Image (cartoon, helix red, strand yellow):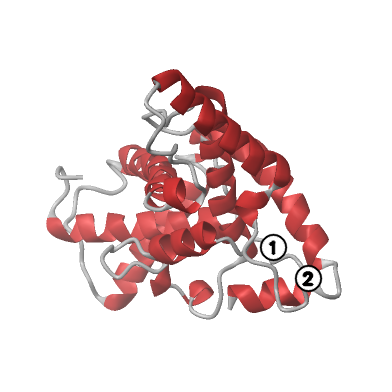
Amino acid sequence: LAFYPPLWRKLLDLAKAQMRLHIAVKNVFPWLEQAVNGIYREVLIEVIAHFEDKGWEVEAGYYPAHRSSMCRLLFNDTQTFRSDIKKAIMKTLPFDYGLYPPPDVGNEGVRIKFVKDRADELLKTSAYLCGEPDALGKASNFAHPTINNACLSLYYSNTSSKSLRQFVEFQTYILYKALILVAAVIHTVLSTLRKHGSEVTGHLVAEDIKCAYNGLEGQVNCILGDPYHGPKLNTLLE
Protein backbone atom coordinates (compact mmCIF):
# COMPACT_ATOMS: atom_id res chain seq x y z
CA LEU A 1 0.00 0.00 0.00
CA ALA A 2 2.92 2.36 0.67
CA PHE A 3 3.65 2.29 -3.07
CA TYR A 4 0.59 4.46 -3.73
CA PRO A 5 0.33 8.22 -3.07
CA PRO A 6 -1.90 9.45 -0.20
CA LEU A 7 -5.20 9.90 -2.05
CA TRP A 8 -4.87 6.51 -3.72
CA ARG A 9 -4.23 4.95 -0.30
CA LYS A 10 -7.41 6.56 0.97
CA LEU A 11 -9.29 5.24 -2.06
CA LEU A 12 -7.93 1.73 -1.58
CA ASP A 13 -8.84 1.77 2.12
CA LEU A 14 -12.42 2.60 1.16
CA ALA A 15 -12.33 -0.17 -1.45
CA LYS A 16 -11.17 -2.59 1.25
CA ALA A 17 -14.07 -1.51 3.46
CA GLN A 18 -16.49 -1.96 0.56
CA MET A 19 -15.08 -5.42 -0.08
CA ARG A 20 -15.47 -6.32 3.59
CA LEU A 21 -19.08 -5.15 3.36
CA HIS A 22 -19.59 -7.40 0.36
CA ILE A 23 -18.11 -10.35 2.26
CA ALA A 24 -20.24 -9.72 5.34
CA VAL A 25 -23.57 -9.34 3.55
CA LYS A 26 -23.35 -11.09 0.17
CA ASN A 27 -20.50 -13.44 -0.66
CA VAL A 28 -18.45 -14.63 2.28
CA PHE A 29 -15.98 -16.62 0.20
CA PRO A 30 -14.96 -14.87 -3.04
CA TRP A 31 -12.12 -16.59 -4.88
CA LEU A 32 -8.83 -15.17 -6.12
CA GLU A 33 -9.94 -15.90 -9.69
CA GLN A 34 -12.57 -13.19 -9.22
CA ALA A 35 -9.95 -10.60 -8.34
CA VAL A 36 -9.25 -8.98 -11.70
CA ASN A 37 -12.44 -9.52 -13.68
CA GLY A 38 -14.97 -10.12 -10.92
CA ILE A 39 -16.22 -8.49 -7.75
CA TYR A 40 -12.85 -7.01 -6.77
CA ARG A 41 -12.68 -5.08 -10.02
CA GLU A 42 -16.31 -3.99 -9.66
CA VAL A 43 -15.70 -2.66 -6.16
CA LEU A 44 -12.58 -0.81 -7.30
CA ILE A 45 -14.43 0.84 -10.21
CA GLU A 46 -17.30 1.78 -7.89
CA VAL A 47 -14.98 3.50 -5.42
CA ILE A 48 -13.08 5.31 -8.20
CA ALA A 49 -16.42 6.60 -9.50
CA HIS A 50 -17.32 7.73 -5.97
CA PHE A 51 -14.10 9.73 -5.72
CA GLU A 52 -14.78 11.31 -9.11
CA ASP A 53 -18.30 12.29 -8.00
CA LYS A 54 -16.81 13.95 -4.93
CA GLY A 55 -14.29 15.83 -7.04
CA TRP A 56 -11.36 14.06 -5.39
CA GLU A 57 -8.88 13.75 -8.23
CA VAL A 58 -6.43 10.93 -7.62
CA GLU A 59 -2.96 11.00 -9.10
CA ALA A 60 -2.72 9.91 -12.74
CA GLY A 61 -0.77 6.90 -13.95
CA TYR A 62 -1.96 4.32 -11.40
CA TYR A 63 -5.21 3.07 -12.94
CA PRO A 64 -5.64 0.99 -15.01
CA ALA A 65 -1.86 0.40 -15.12
CA HIS A 66 -1.86 -1.16 -11.63
CA ARG A 67 -5.40 -2.57 -11.68
CA SER A 68 -4.28 -6.17 -11.19
CA SER A 69 -2.11 -5.35 -8.18
CA MET A 70 -4.91 -3.23 -6.70
CA CYS A 71 -7.36 -6.11 -7.05
CA ARG A 72 -4.84 -8.49 -5.49
CA LEU A 73 -4.48 -6.02 -2.62
CA LEU A 74 -8.24 -6.20 -2.06
CA PHE A 75 -8.16 -10.00 -2.18
CA ASN A 76 -5.36 -10.14 0.39
CA ASP A 77 -7.40 -7.91 2.68
CA THR A 78 -10.23 -10.46 2.68
CA GLN A 79 -7.80 -12.82 4.41
CA THR A 80 -6.85 -10.04 6.80
CA PHE A 81 -10.57 -9.53 7.49
CA ARG A 82 -10.92 -13.15 8.62
CA SER A 83 -7.85 -12.70 10.83
CA ASP A 84 -9.43 -9.55 12.29
CA ILE A 85 -12.56 -11.55 13.11
CA LYS A 86 -10.41 -14.12 14.90
CA LYS A 87 -8.60 -11.38 16.86
CA ALA A 88 -11.92 -9.85 17.94
CA ILE A 89 -13.12 -13.27 19.10
CA MET A 90 -9.94 -14.24 20.94
CA LYS A 91 -10.16 -11.16 23.16
CA THR A 92 -12.77 -12.92 25.30
CA LEU A 93 -13.20 -16.47 23.97
CA PRO A 94 -10.96 -18.39 26.43
CA PHE A 95 -12.58 -16.72 29.46
CA ASP A 96 -16.18 -16.63 28.18
CA TYR A 97 -16.12 -20.31 27.24
CA GLY A 98 -14.33 -21.56 30.34
CA LEU A 99 -11.29 -22.76 28.41
CA TYR A 100 -8.76 -21.91 31.11
CA PRO A 101 -7.80 -25.07 33.04
CA PRO A 102 -8.12 -24.92 36.85
CA PRO A 103 -5.06 -23.28 38.45
CA ASP A 104 -4.15 -26.46 40.32
CA VAL A 105 -3.64 -28.35 37.04
CA GLY A 106 0.10 -28.28 36.52
CA ASN A 107 0.65 -31.14 34.11
CA GLU A 108 0.78 -29.93 30.50
CA GLY A 109 -0.88 -33.08 29.18
CA VAL A 110 -3.79 -32.69 31.59
CA ARG A 111 -4.16 -29.03 30.67
CA ILE A 112 -4.32 -29.88 26.96
CA LYS A 113 -6.90 -32.60 27.62
CA PHE A 114 -9.01 -30.14 29.62
CA VAL A 115 -9.09 -27.68 26.71
CA LYS A 116 -9.84 -30.41 24.17
CA ASP A 117 -12.70 -31.82 26.24
CA ARG A 118 -14.17 -28.39 26.95
CA ALA A 119 -14.08 -27.38 23.27
CA ASP A 120 -15.65 -30.72 22.32
CA GLU A 121 -18.48 -30.18 24.80
CA LEU A 122 -19.15 -26.65 23.52
CA LEU A 123 -19.35 -27.84 19.93
CA LYS A 124 -21.41 -30.98 20.55
CA THR A 125 -24.02 -29.14 22.63
CA SER A 126 -23.89 -25.89 20.59
CA ALA A 127 -23.49 -24.13 23.93
CA TYR A 128 -21.01 -21.75 22.27
CA LEU A 129 -23.95 -20.20 20.40
CA CYS A 130 -26.39 -19.72 23.27
CA GLY A 131 -26.87 -16.98 25.81
CA GLU A 132 -28.80 -17.36 29.05
CA PRO A 133 -32.34 -18.78 28.74
CA ASP A 134 -35.03 -16.10 28.59
CA ALA A 135 -37.75 -15.41 31.18
CA LEU A 136 -39.78 -18.33 29.83
CA GLY A 137 -36.82 -20.67 30.11
CA LYS A 138 -36.41 -20.88 26.35
CA ALA A 139 -33.08 -20.90 24.54
CA SER A 140 -31.45 -17.66 23.45
CA ASN A 141 -29.98 -18.65 20.10
CA PHE A 142 -26.84 -16.91 18.79
CA ALA A 143 -26.90 -14.74 21.91
CA HIS A 144 -23.66 -15.83 23.56
CA PRO A 145 -21.68 -12.82 24.84
CA THR A 146 -18.64 -13.82 22.77
CA ILE A 147 -20.68 -13.51 19.57
CA ASN A 148 -22.16 -10.19 20.66
CA ASN A 149 -18.83 -8.72 21.77
CA ALA A 150 -17.05 -9.83 18.61
CA CYS A 151 -19.76 -8.34 16.36
CA LEU A 152 -19.61 -5.01 18.16
CA SER A 153 -15.81 -4.90 18.19
CA LEU A 154 -15.47 -5.97 14.57
CA TYR A 155 -18.30 -4.22 12.77
CA TYR A 156 -18.70 -1.08 14.88
CA SER A 157 -15.14 -0.06 15.72
CA ASN A 158 -14.59 3.70 15.59
CA THR A 159 -10.83 3.35 15.21
CA SER A 160 -10.63 1.77 11.75
CA SER A 161 -11.18 3.31 8.33
CA LYS A 162 -12.49 -0.11 7.28
CA SER A 163 -15.21 -0.30 9.95
CA LEU A 164 -18.57 -1.37 8.53
CA ARG A 165 -20.46 1.06 10.76
CA GLN A 166 -19.94 3.70 8.04
CA PHE A 167 -22.32 1.85 5.70
CA VAL A 168 -26.10 2.15 5.87
CA GLU A 169 -26.47 -1.64 5.88
CA PHE A 170 -25.00 -1.77 9.40
CA GLN A 171 -26.63 1.30 10.90
CA THR A 172 -29.90 -0.36 11.93
CA TYR A 173 -29.07 -3.97 12.74
CA ILE A 174 -26.49 -6.71 12.28
CA LEU A 175 -27.26 -8.71 9.16
CA TYR A 176 -27.74 -12.48 9.34
CA LYS A 177 -24.73 -13.30 7.18
CA ALA A 178 -22.51 -11.04 9.29
CA LEU A 179 -23.69 -12.83 12.44
CA ILE A 180 -23.15 -16.25 10.88
CA LEU A 181 -19.64 -15.30 9.74
CA VAL A 182 -18.58 -14.47 13.31
CA ALA A 183 -20.19 -17.66 14.65
CA ALA A 184 -18.46 -19.71 11.93
CA VAL A 185 -15.05 -18.35 12.90
CA ILE A 186 -15.79 -19.17 16.56
CA HIS A 187 -16.74 -22.71 15.50
CA THR A 188 -13.49 -23.01 13.54
CA VAL A 189 -11.38 -21.78 16.46
CA LEU A 190 -13.11 -24.21 18.84
CA SER A 191 -12.58 -27.04 16.35
CA THR A 192 -8.87 -26.24 16.35
CA LEU A 193 -8.82 -26.27 20.16
CA ARG A 194 -10.67 -29.59 20.19
CA LYS A 195 -8.01 -31.06 17.91
CA HIS A 196 -4.85 -29.54 19.36
CA GLY A 197 -5.70 -28.33 22.86
CA SER A 198 -4.20 -24.92 22.12
CA GLU A 199 -4.52 -22.09 19.63
CA VAL A 200 -2.73 -22.55 16.32
CA THR A 201 -1.15 -19.37 14.99
CA GLY A 202 -1.57 -18.18 11.42
CA HIS A 203 -4.52 -17.76 9.09
CA LEU A 204 -7.63 -19.86 9.56
CA VAL A 205 -8.39 -22.23 6.70
CA ALA A 206 -11.11 -20.69 4.53
CA GLU A 207 -12.61 -24.09 3.71
CA ASP A 208 -13.04 -24.85 7.43
CA ILE A 209 -14.85 -21.55 7.95
CA LYS A 210 -17.01 -22.20 4.89
CA CYS A 211 -18.02 -25.65 6.15
CA ALA A 212 -19.00 -24.22 9.55
CA TYR A 213 -20.77 -21.30 7.87
CA ASN A 214 -22.95 -23.54 5.72
CA GLY A 215 -24.10 -25.53 8.75
CA LEU A 216 -24.81 -22.43 10.82
CA GLU A 217 -26.70 -20.78 7.98
CA GLY A 218 -29.08 -23.74 8.01
CA GLN A 219 -29.58 -23.30 11.75
CA VAL A 220 -30.37 -19.61 11.36
CA ASN A 221 -32.90 -20.35 8.63
CA CYS A 222 -34.62 -22.85 10.92
CA ILE A 223 -34.69 -20.33 13.76
CA LEU A 224 -36.16 -17.64 11.52
CA GLY A 225 -38.96 -20.02 10.59
CA ASP A 226 -39.93 -20.48 14.23
CA PRO A 227 -42.80 -18.21 15.38
CA TYR A 228 -41.15 -17.61 18.76
CA HIS A 229 -37.42 -17.77 18.16
CA GLY A 230 -37.45 -16.02 14.76
CA PRO A 231 -38.74 -12.65 16.05
CA LYS A 232 -36.54 -13.05 19.12
CA LEU A 233 -33.42 -13.36 16.95
CA ASN A 234 -34.44 -10.33 14.89
CA THR A 235 -34.84 -8.28 18.06
CA LEU A 236 -31.40 -9.42 19.23
CA LEU A 237 -29.78 -8.16 16.04
CA GLU A 238 -31.28 -4.66 16.21
Q: Secondary structure at mark 2?
A: helix
The reply to whether residue 207 is in sight is: no
The quadrant the N terminus occupies is top left
Give the percent coordinates (x, y) of residue 93.
45, 49
The quadrant the C terminus occupies is bottom right
Query: In terms of depth relative to the viewer, which is nearer, 73 or 25?
Result: 25
Query: In terms of depth relative to the viewer, which is nearer, 210 or 183?
Result: 183
Relative side of 174 to 65, left or right: right
Q: Is residue 151 above or below residue 2?
A: below
Q: Secondary structure at mark 1?
A: loop
Q: Which residue is mark 2?
A: 229
Quarter where residue 225 is shown: bottom right
Q: Amino acid at mark 2?
A: His
How much space separates mark 1 and mark 2, taking CA atoms? 8 Å
Query: Which of pointers 1 and 2 lies earlier in the amino acid sequence?
Result: 1
Q: Which residue is mark 1?
A: 141
